[in-house]
Image (cartoon, helix red, strand yellow):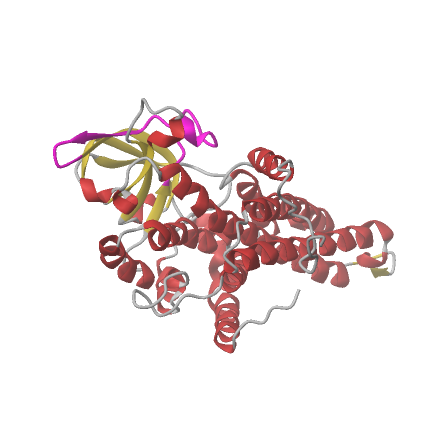
């Protein structure tokens, strides 16, 4: 794959790489183990313009390609996955506003979202259900000149600091089929909206994941994304394309960090008179790790390139998310095995990679759901998703 990125995007990637090496890597383990919110690093990310990467002029400084966005995500994740996670839902909301929002909604939110002054979160998952979004129970009931919202959302990343929440809710619970009664409500903090608790996690520390409670929360009629109720499920599915590419890119970043740590250690550590990579068991693991890492990145970049071309890419994004996250989990485990007891120690970041990796398997739609999406798309007779780019239909 040839990445013909413009020079300004290449310079951005170099800048982010320098930021990760100089500012993130030295402090990531300390902040992660203390579960401390990275205020200073987030402020630096704002100054670098990272919260506005998907926001074009006139609302922001200029939108980068999805390929560049994925590579920025990878760089951040190799330093500390939590920082890449801080961009995830925020970027999905930015993309949804651009694709579906009214001019008034874009003008109200996008300039502040681009600078990071305003942070956004997505509220999809509920305590009684995750991947089955059609079965959500949070409702927004029409009441005079507004909506009254009741329900509970959980595992909402960044919710405590979010000034805007893309809330998936039912505006017509009786709709048949159910997805026609689902809308996205642009909710701002206010009476009736409570961040009820922060949820403890195995990994993904520093960035909060919260439970939200809506108790007669009121929002104006124009808070519906695009101002047309009942199309939120389609809007969400479209937004999840960029979301799954972002999660896949996070997987590549964590896998890259784990692989590099294992490769360096396997060169330095000696056993029976030679570096341990020369022993077949370790060398074979490194070979498989490097191959999985390279294949994962290619899948991510392919999905990102298709999205940049304006093509449907739910299949490719699902494949990238599935393969990259499963590969990340295996690479992180193999990195621990290569390090031996040192890989189990909290003094080295290898154990952090192992704790962060499972999130990508679960988040943005579980991999079990990804397999269902992939199977359904592959079964569509009119679609040939695996045909090479240079192939032409028969004459």
The quadrant in which the C terminus is found is: bottom right
Q: Nearer the viewer, residue 35 or 173?
A: 173
Magenta-drawn stretch contains 133: yes
Is residue 135 placed above or below 275 in the rendered structure? Answer: above
Q: Nearer the viewer, residue 70 or 99?
A: 99
Residue 173 image offset from top left, x and y in percent: 31, 24
Report the side of 268 relative to 115 (left or right): right
Is residue 114 placed above or below 299 in the rendered structure? Answer: below
Q: Residue furthest top?
A: 174
Residue 224 image offset from top left, x and y in percent: 26, 42
Residue 348 in view here: no
Report the side of 198 relative to 339 (left or right): left
Q: Nearer the viewer, residue 266 or 90?
A: 90
Residue at 39 percent of width and 31 percent of height = 179
Residue 121 in view here: yes
Total label count?
Answer: 0
Q: Residue furthest bottom?
A: 7
Q: Residue furthest front?
A: 395
Residue 358 image offset from top left, x and y in percent: 57, 41
Range drawn in magenta = 123-146
Magenta-drawn stretch contains 190: no
**Quadrant in the picture for residue 40:** bottom left
Residue 218 image offset from top left, x and y in percent: 17, 36
Residue at 74 percent of width and 55 percent of height = 291
Report the side of 306 relative to 279 (left or right): left
The quadrant in which the N terminus is found is: bottom right
Report the side of 279 relative to 104 (left or right): right
């Amino acid at each position: 794959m040839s990445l013909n990125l413009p020079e300004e995007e290449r310079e951005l990637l170099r800048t982010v790489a320098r930021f990760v090496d100089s500012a993130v890597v030295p402090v990531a383990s300390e902040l992660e183990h203390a579960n401390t919110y990275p205020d200073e690093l987030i402020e630096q990310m704002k100054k670098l313009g990272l919260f506005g990467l998907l926001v074009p002029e006139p609302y922001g400084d200029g939108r980068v390609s999805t390929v560049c966005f994925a590579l920025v995500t990878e760089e951040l994740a190799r330093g500390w996955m939590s920082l890449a996670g801080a961009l995830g839902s925020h970027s999905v909301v930015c993309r949804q506003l651009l694709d579906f929002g009214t001019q008034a909604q874009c003008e109200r939110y996008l300039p502040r979202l681009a600078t990071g002054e305003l942070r956004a979160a997505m509220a999809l998952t509920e305590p009684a259900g995750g991947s089955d979004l059609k079965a959500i129970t949070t409702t927004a009931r029409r009441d005079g000149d507004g909506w009254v919202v009741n329900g509970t959302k959980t595992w909402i990343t960044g919710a405590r600091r979010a000034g805007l929440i893309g809330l998936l809710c039912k505006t017509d619970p009786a709709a048949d089929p159910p997805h026609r009664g689902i809308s996205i409500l642009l909710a701002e903090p206010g009476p009736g909206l409570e961040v009820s608790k922060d949820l403890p996690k195995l990994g993904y520390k520093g960035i909060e994941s919260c439970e939200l409670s809506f108790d007669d929360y009121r929002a104006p009629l124009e808070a519906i994304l695009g101002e047309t109720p009942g199309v939120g499920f389609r809007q969400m599915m479209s937004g999840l394309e960029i979301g799954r590419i972002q999660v896949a890119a996070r997987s590549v970043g964590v896998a890259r960090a784990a692989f590099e740590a294992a490769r360096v250690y396997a060169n330095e550590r000696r056993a029976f008179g030679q570096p341990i990579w020369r022993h077949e068991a370790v060398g074979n693991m490194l070979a498989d790790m490097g191959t999985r890492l390279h294949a994962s990145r290619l899948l991510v970049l392919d999905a990102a390139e298709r999205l940049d071309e304006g093509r449907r890419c739910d299949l490719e994004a699902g494949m990238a998310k599935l393969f990259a996250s499963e590969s990340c989990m295996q690479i992180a485990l193999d990195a621990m095995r290569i390090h031996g007891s040192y890989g189990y120690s909290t003094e080295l970041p290898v154990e952090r990679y192992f704790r962060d990796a499972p999130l990508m398997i679960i988040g943005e739609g579980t991999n079990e759901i990804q397999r269902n999406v992939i199977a359904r798309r592959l079964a569509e007779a009119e679609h040939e998703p695996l045909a090479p780019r240079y192939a032409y239909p028969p004459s």
